[in-house]
């Protein structure tokens, strides 16, 4: 398991979070003078001492159950901020229920100010910690040197993922592979698997990833035997990518370990819950968004002319063709489907067809706003695989078509893990993960993460 911080740091984080929550509560209690609804009740009129124990305990439990303290799931700052937002929202709901449904009658504005202060400080100290950790990591000499056995697609995909996570303490040493062709073609291949003990000693390797193809069982067994007497951590990556396995759970029969491969479809109850969720959030969102959309319509009309709205054919759930609409961001002649045949599989950050206003709309994702009306009609969902252009869909391999088994979405797991930085036809593994792990909570997580990414403007063009 790849982790950014140690268990000791996790314990420190819990203690710091407790200090932040209690400190915020103390500050509001000390300096907040506004009475509750014109009366004389202060912020915490009853059992103030008890609140200093109950509030942080409740909040910490909410953070814990939302994976904030799972170092393997908070490698990226956006993930950590999203988990904190989910946990803090749960804490807000729970504490509000305890206070406002009971007899405590605190100041509503004071309570909300406490929540906002504590939430902001929870984010702030983590930003500082990450900045210090990244800048000082090389001085402490605590890097983890890792070696990958197998320079094939699985091994290279692993290195790409670790690089994408930007782990400052993980240092890539190279590959070992028995293929003479790979040793001759790639400078990162240091030798064959027989040289494993020597390379580990020479490169001071701490972690070995076995990413050999599944037909190389004998070499996998041989490598494990060599590694069993060496002081390194060993992880095996199953070579199941071509079988579209991107989520497995472990179980056992007696003392026999199993990997359970599953690809669940949406049940009727899940589909109903997802539709209710989509309708509720979309209606609530469109109320403040309509004036913004009107302003954007006028800007596009005045600056770039007509048409203001671009309509495209896309492949929806079960292969049905749907129409999606966006604010036009390209020159008029560049926005029809025939013109989009220019390098359609990869979006170009410097595409000359994009107008100046269009570039800003794409960077802020405001060009996507008209698609919320498609969600209202039921042809799309807020979260799901992105609907593909028909001509690209025709190039899909059979295993890629699984992404059409659920409603297509405005945002999704692929978008929050790269957005336009990733080629359109190579997003299937992210959509597979979403399908296999679907829940309303995952939809909420993706929407919150989308919010953070849109604020940063990363990968949108």
Image: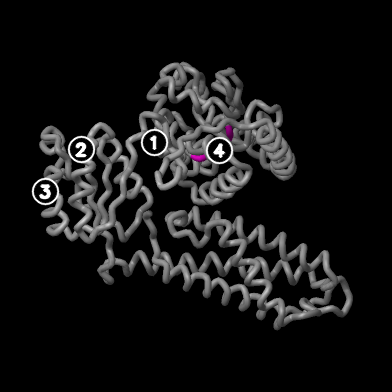
Instruction: Using the image, tell me which numbered label, if any, was put on residue 195.
Output: 3
| For residue 353, above or below residue 195 | above
Identify the residue position indicated by label 2 in the image: 218
Tell me how far mark 3 sits from mark 2, CA to CA: 16 Å
The part of the image, by quadrant, that contains residue 258 is top left
Residue 174 percent coordinates (x, y): 19, 48
> Which residue is rendered at x = 53% and y = 31% of the image?
386
Type of secondary structure dominating the magenta stretch: strand
Instruction: Judge by depth and name the residue closer to the eye, 107 or 197.
Output: 197
Q: Mark 4 points at which residue?
A: 411
- Name which of mark 3 and mark 1 comes first in the sequence: 3
Let me know if residue 291 appears in the view.
no
Instruction: Give the CA separation, mark 4 to mark 3.
Output: 46 Å
Which residue is depicted at the point 72% across and 45% down?
Answer: 288
Quarter of the image where one finds residue 387: top right
Q: Is residue 457 above or below residue 135?
A: above
Among numbered discs 3 and 2, the one appearing first in the sequence: 3
Q: Does the magenta stretch include residue 412?
A: yes
**Is 87 in the magenta?**
no
* Residue 83 image position (x, y, % from top left): 55, 56
- Is 413 above or below relative to 244? below
Residue lying furthest front? 254
Circle 2/circle 1 CB separation < 8 Å: no
- Dot 1 crowding, Cα within 10 Å, few <14, some 14–19, many 20+: few
Q: From the viewer's perspective, is residue 5 above or below residue 343?
A: below
Residue designated by label 1: 350
Viewer-nearest of discs 4 and 1: 4
């Amino acid at each position: 398991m790849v982790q950014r911080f140690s268990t000791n740091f996790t314990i420190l984080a819990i203690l710091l979070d407790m200090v932040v929550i209690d400190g915020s509560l103390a500050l509001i209690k000390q300096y907040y003078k506004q009475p509750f609804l014109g009366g004389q009740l202060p912020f915490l009129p009853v059992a103030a001492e008890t609140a200093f124990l109950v509030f942080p305990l409740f909040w910490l439990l909410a953070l814990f159950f939302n994976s904030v303290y799972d170092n393997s799931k908070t490698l990226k700052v956006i993930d950590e901020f999203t988990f904190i937002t989910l946990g803090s929202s749960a804490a807000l709901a729970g504490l509000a229920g305890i206070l406002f449904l009971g007899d405590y009658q605190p100041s509503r504005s004071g309570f909300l100010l406490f929540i906002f202060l504590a939430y902001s400080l929870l984010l702030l100290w983590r930003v500082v910690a990450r900045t210090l950790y990244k800048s000082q990591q090389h001085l402490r000499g605590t890097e983890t040197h890792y070696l990958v056995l197998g320079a094939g697609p699985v091994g290279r995909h692993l290195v790409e993922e670790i690089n994408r996570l930007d782990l400052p303490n993980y240092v890539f040493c190279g590959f070992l592979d028995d293929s003479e062709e790979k040793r001759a073609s790639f400078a990162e291949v240091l030798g064959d698997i027989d040289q494993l003990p020597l390379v580990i000693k020479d490169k001071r390797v701490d972690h070995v990833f076995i990413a050999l193809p599944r037909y190389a069982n004998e070499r996998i067994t041989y490598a494990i035997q060599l590694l069993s007497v060496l002081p390194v951590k060993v992880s095996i990556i199953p070579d199941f990518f071509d079988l579209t396995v991107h989520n497995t759970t472990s179980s056992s029969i007696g003392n026999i370990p199993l990997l359970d491969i599953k690809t669940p479809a949406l049940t009727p109850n899940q589909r109903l819950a997802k539709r209710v969720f989509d309708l509720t959030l979309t209606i609530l969102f469109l109320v403040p968004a309509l004036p913004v959309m009107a302003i954007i319509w006028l800007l596009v009309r005045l600056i770039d002319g007509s048409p203001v709205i671009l309509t495209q054919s896309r492949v929806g759930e079960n292969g049905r063709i749907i129409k999606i609409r966006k604010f036009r961001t390209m020159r008029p002649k560049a926005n029809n489907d025939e013109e989009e045949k220019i390098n359609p599989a990869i979006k170009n950050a410097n595409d000359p067809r994009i107008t100046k206003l269009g570039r800003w709309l794409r960077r802020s994702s405001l060009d996507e706003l008209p698609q919320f009306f498609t969600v209202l009609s039921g042809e799309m969902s807020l979260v799901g695989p992105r609907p593909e252009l028909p001509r690209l869909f025709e190039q899909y391999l059979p295993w890629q078509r699984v992404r059409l088994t659920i409603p297509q979405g405005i945002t999704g797991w692929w978008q929050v893990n790269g957005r336009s930085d990733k080629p359109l036809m190579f997003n299937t593994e992210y959509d597979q993960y979403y399908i296999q792990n679907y829940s309303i909570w995952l939809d909420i997580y993706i929407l919150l993460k989308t919010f953070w990414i849109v604020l940063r403007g990363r990968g949108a063009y």
